[in-house]
Amino acid sequence: MTRYSRQDVLRILHLRARQLTAWEQAGLISPNDNYSFEDLSQLRTLRTLRATRITAKSIRESVDAMRRVAGMGNPLNEASAVGRGSHLAFRHNGALVDPLTKQLSFDFEAGTKRQLSIVGAAVEAREPDVQELFQRAVRLEEDSATIAKAAELYRHILTLHPGYAAAAINLGTIHYNQSEFSLAEKFYRHATEADPEYALAFFDLGNVLDEMKCLSDAVAAYQRAIALVPQYADAHYNLALAYERQGQRRRSLRHWLTYVRLDPVGPWANHAKAQARSILSTERLSIVSRSGRLVQAG
């Protein structure tokens, strides 16, 4: 069975080490030095969920509840997690299950091609072909020898279902990791158009635009990600960096401070704190007092 080192996981999923550590500390993934394909799939799901308003604590509560309600060993791999307010629901066998309220409903959003039959609370369904193709592409992607086949399959999925944003993001990331930034931008933009509420798509778009030195466009993409998910710590961090590269240190300050509030521990937090201190010590900033009077800082 193929195993992946910690560095492999960070590279493949485009994660920071402190994020992986945070998920381990939250009990969402077991601490390890090497990971299975199932671990990789679970981490990919967590990466997507990070770009939502759902906290790690709420994810853990929903996962634990799904284990109890459905008897699943690993709901993040055995079902499809979707945001529902401040917690998760799970798509499974043609049904949408809210494990915290124990509500079961038809999964109308999953597509009209499914044929459902219900026996009591059990729901049987055949997953759409596009879902099966996507899972096959994900497996191909994790092996360096079959990445080209994965890219070809993602392209086929987008031909069948142009609105499949997750396939566009994964294809964009394949090109990003190969330093094919123009192609990566194309598919990340495709994802933002397919799902304008998908914060992760705008975040990834900002990253590739930053690599291409298109800082104004990168700033706009990060801003959109933050507008969708104000607690998106990584987007605040990267937006602060982009502002600094533009020489707009005052604008970066707010996002350094926000990042520290959202993610206060670790090397990235230390860097953000240092940047904020540097700006506060060298810039004369106008601050509005509680009375509404403008005063000067520094």
Image (spheres, helix red, strand yellow):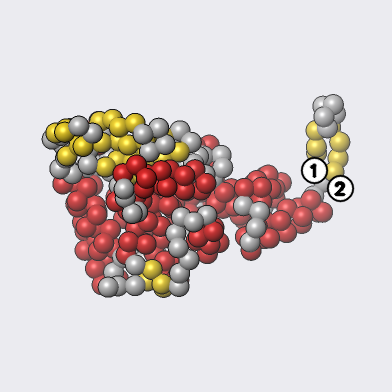
Residue 168 visible somewhere in the drawing: no
Residue 238 to residue 95: above or below:
below
The local secondary structure at tag 1 comes to strand
Quadrant assignment, res 104: top left
Rendered location of residue 89, percent (x, y): 37, 38
Quadrant assignment, res 146: bottom left
Name the residue located 27 percent from the left edge and 66 percent from the top edge: 147
Name the residue located 79 percent from the left edge and 51 percent from the top edge: 280
Rendered location of residue 250, percent (x, y): 71, 46
The residue that disc 1 covers is 285
- Nearest the camera: 234 or 132? 132
Q: Is residue 200 left or right of residue 268?
A: left
Q: Which mark identifies residue 298?
A: 2
Say what amino acid the circle numbered 2 marks.
Answer: Gly
| Classed neighbour count for the residue bearing mark 2: other residues with Cα under 10 Å, few (<14), some (14–19), many (≥20) | few
Say what amino acid the circle numbered 1 marks.
Answer: Leu
Give me the C-alpha separation between circle 1 and circle 2: 7 Å
